[in-house]
Structures are given as structure tokens and as C-alpha cells.
Amino acid sequence: MKNRLHQGVFCALIVLLSCNGCASFNASSNEYAMRNEEASQRQQVELDRPALDNKQVYLDMIKKMQERSLYFASIAHIDSYQKTYGTSPEVQRLYADALRATGQDDSAEKQYRALLNGTEAAAAWHGLGLLEAQRGSSAKAISNLRVSSRLDPTNALVLSDLSYALLADGDNNAARIPLMQAVELAPGNRKVISNLALFFMLSGDEAKAEALMKEAKMSSEVRAEILKRQESITKGKPKSASTQDARSRIMPVVASGSGMQLQLQMQLLSPQSGVSARSE
């Protein structure tokens, strides 16, 4: 009788252990399935995520506002952006640009100088150059813009601003190289084209400047501004020998069906060259 009882208990124990083993196996299987499902869902979320999140969309909106010269409004939005998403060197540089454009020069300079050792150093030197130009300090403006250009050598706007600063300083000869580079890098940029028209005027080739402005379909307001700057520079600076000599080395203008394209040749800018330009 005792043996039967022992056998019954033993069998029950085996069954119980077997069931526990099944339960453990089933639990492991369920956990594995749940993990698989969770990973699959995470992967699907990543696939469904939009290319730009709200943070990037907001930053792009601020940049577009500044492109439209809405600098006062951009300052308010930068403040809002930083409260929501925090700051970054790029955001700080946009803030400095807005401060400069709204006449807050001292605050802008402080903001730019805080960025000189980081990823926005080239843009910060550019901003400092523009600040000095606004203050009428051409030597400091040229120096800062040269530093910016060395850090970011393919930035057409920096090159264009450097050429303008050199033109304003009466150094047409030095202005030609950065202007040529700017035109080749960004042939459709209106600011670059305006500076090229100014270069033609200061070089004594009003006909070439007029042809360029006509081809670029510049408004009467833009034309008036270029003429105003030419008169200001001419009145403030005596014509140098390099300015007179530049008349024989004017850069050609080529129009294409896809819009204005400015095609320049290095030999026309060489001081040793006596080649005359022609319009095509």
C-alpha cells in the first residue's frame, strides 16, 4: 500500500514538473514573441517618421524669415525656438545675424565673438566683417571677411561681400579675384550680380554695367541703389591707377536660355594680361 502511495506521489511530481516546464517554455516563447512584436513596431515607427521633425521645420521657417529680411520677427521666433528645443551654434548665429540687421551692433558683436572657436566660426567672422563695414571701418571689415573666406573658401556671399568691401576701400584690383570667384560659384545670385555691376561702374565701363543690369532685369530701385553706392565710393575715394587699368580687363557676360550666367576667364583678371573682354 505504501509502495502504491509512493508511486502515485512520484507520478504526480513528474506530471507537476512537466507542467512547470511547459509553463516556463510557454512563458519564454510568449516573451520572445512580444519582444519581436515590439521591435517590429519600433522599426515601423522609424519608417513612418517624417523626414523633418517639428524642430527642423521651425528652424527652416526662421531661416526663411531672415531671407525675407523679417529680422525683428525672427528674433521673437528664435526666443520661442530656444525655449522649446534649446539652443545650438547655428541658432546662436542666426540670432547674431538678426541683432546685426536690427541695429543692435554691440549685442551682435558679443554673440558673434562667442562663436569664433566653434562650427559657426566662418559665419561669425563674416558677421563681424559686415558689422565693421556698417561702422565704416573698411580695414577691419576686409580683415574679418578674409578670415571668413579662408575658413569657408567656397561661400559665394562671403567672397561677394569681401569684393564689395575692397571696392568701397578703393582697391578695384584686389576686388576682382574674389568677385570673379563669387560670380562663378553663384552666377544667379542677385547680390553677386549687383556687385559685379558696381565693379563695372567703378571701372569706368558704364555700358557693360547697363547691359548687365538690363539682362538681369534689375528693378529701377536696385539700379538706383547701385548708382548711389557708386557715387558714394567715387566721392569718398580717389581713383587709383589699378581702377583706371581695370577698364581693359572687363569680365564678359553670357546669357543663356536658362537664365543669367556670368562666365569669367582668369586671364582677363591677371594684371599681366592685356586681353580685352567681349560680350557674347
Image (tube, helix red, strand yellow):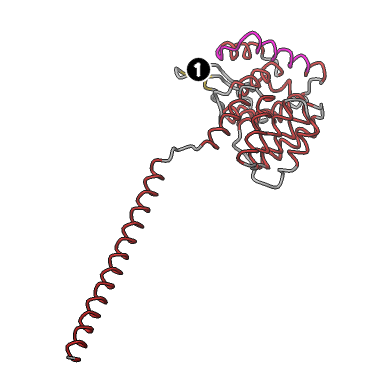
Q: Which residue is drawn at 63% across and 14% down?
A: 209
Nearer to us in this view, 106 or 255: 106
Please indicate whether residue 188 sits to the left or right of residue 172 in the image: left
Q: Closer to the camera, 262 or 20?
A: 20
* Nearer to me, 13 or 272: 13
Task: Indicate whether 104 appears above or below 236.
Answer: below
- Residue 167 is left or right of residue 273, and the answer is right
The part of the image, by quadrant, that contains residue 266 is top right
Residue at 55 percent of width and 19 percent of height: 253
Residue 232: image location, x then y, percent = 78, 16
Classify mark 1: residues with Cα within 10 Å, few (<14), some (14-19) or many (20+).
Answer: some
Mark 1 sits on what residue? Answer: 255
Residue range corresponding to the magenta coloring = 215-232
Under mark 1, the amino acid is Ala
Query: From this viewpoint, which residue is outermost toward the front?
Result: 1
How many discs appear?
A: 1
Is residue 257 located in the magenta-colored stretch of the structure?
no
Label 1 secondary element: strand
Q: Residue furthest bottom?
A: 2
Q: Quadrant of residue 26?
A: bottom left
Residue at 55% in and 13% down? 215
Q: Can residue 217 be found in the magenta stretch?
A: yes
Tell me residue 262's x, y (percent).
55, 23
Dominant secondary structure, magenta: helix
Q: In which quarter of the image is the N terminus?
A: bottom left
Decide: is 39 above or below 239. Answer: below
**Position of 144 compared to 200: left or right?**
right
Residue 21's spot in the image, x, y percent? Answer: 27, 73
> x%, y% of residue 148?
68, 38
